[in-house]
Image (spheres, rainbow, N blue to C red):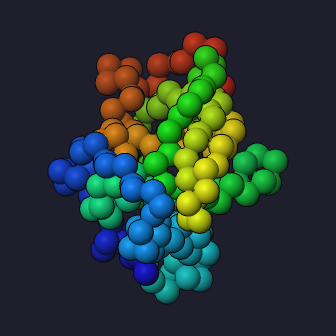
Amino acid sequence: MITMKDIIREGHPTLRKMAEDVSLPPSADDKEILRSLLEYVVNSQDPEIASKYGLRPGVGLAAPQINVAKKMLAINVIDDKGTLYSHALFNPKIISHSVEKAYLTSGEGCLSVDRHVPGFVPRYARVTIKAWNLDGEEVKLRLKGFPAIVIQHEIDHLNGVMFYDHINEENPFQPIPGALAIER
């Protein structure tokens, strides 16, 4: 089981590396790593389990965050309509996206970042993702709003990008023209 001590923090070189593709079909080891990423985000959202194991709540986790430079991520997030998006993915890739942008009014956080970084993080409002699931089957996901923001944050980790790289340094809260403001 992944705990907070397994999650590397900003400044660690793996967080700035391009992750490598996972060979398909995935190995038993890769499947186990991916399962554990999903297990962490699910468990971290359960107050009892999170308290017992000292887990910081999260909605997504990427393999580079546990010092594995491979393209694997997990999300467990509920959209504004109450729909659960719980996915463990190998080699996820954005294959199309909206022109419209979106951002979280409260800003973004990250399990690898122990400080609050204020500012708006512009993301695509809608994305289509192609990836492979734990069974090695190809999947296509169409996400919008909060789930779309979460998966883009995690895909950034696979490309060595941190959320604060997107924040306007001169004016962190500069309005993003025509963007969808998402309250969380």
Residue for point 66% across, 25% down: 180
Task: Out of 25 and 120, give the one closest to the viewer.
Answer: 25
In which quadrant of the rendered view does residue 55 lie? bottom left
Q: Classify 86 as above or below 147.
A: below
Q: Position of residue 100 (x, y in %)?
A: 63, 19
- Specify the farthest residue to the top: 177
In which quadrant of the rendered view does residue 114 lie? bottom left
Q: Classify 176 as above or below 53.
A: above
- Specify the farthest residue to the front: 25
**How many marks overall?**
0
Residue for point 31% across, 72% down: 6
Q: Position of residue 78 (x, y in %)?
A: 70, 54
Left or right of 183? Residue 160 is left
> Can residue 57 be seen here?
no
Residue for point 39% across, 29% down: 166
Residue for point 24% across, 44% down: 16
Q: Position of residue 47 (x, y in %)?
A: 60, 76
Left or right of 183? Residue 171 is left
Left or right of 141? Residue 33 is left
Q: Classify 182 as above or below 179.
A: below
Task: Out of 55 and 172, give the one closest to the viewer.
Answer: 55
Q: Position of residue 84 (x, y in %)?
A: 73, 57
Task: Out of 167 and 129, give the one closest to the viewer.
Answer: 129
> Can residue 49 be seen here?
yes
Question: Quadrant location of the N terminus?
Answer: bottom left
Task: Out of 166 and 68, give the one closest to the viewer.
Answer: 68
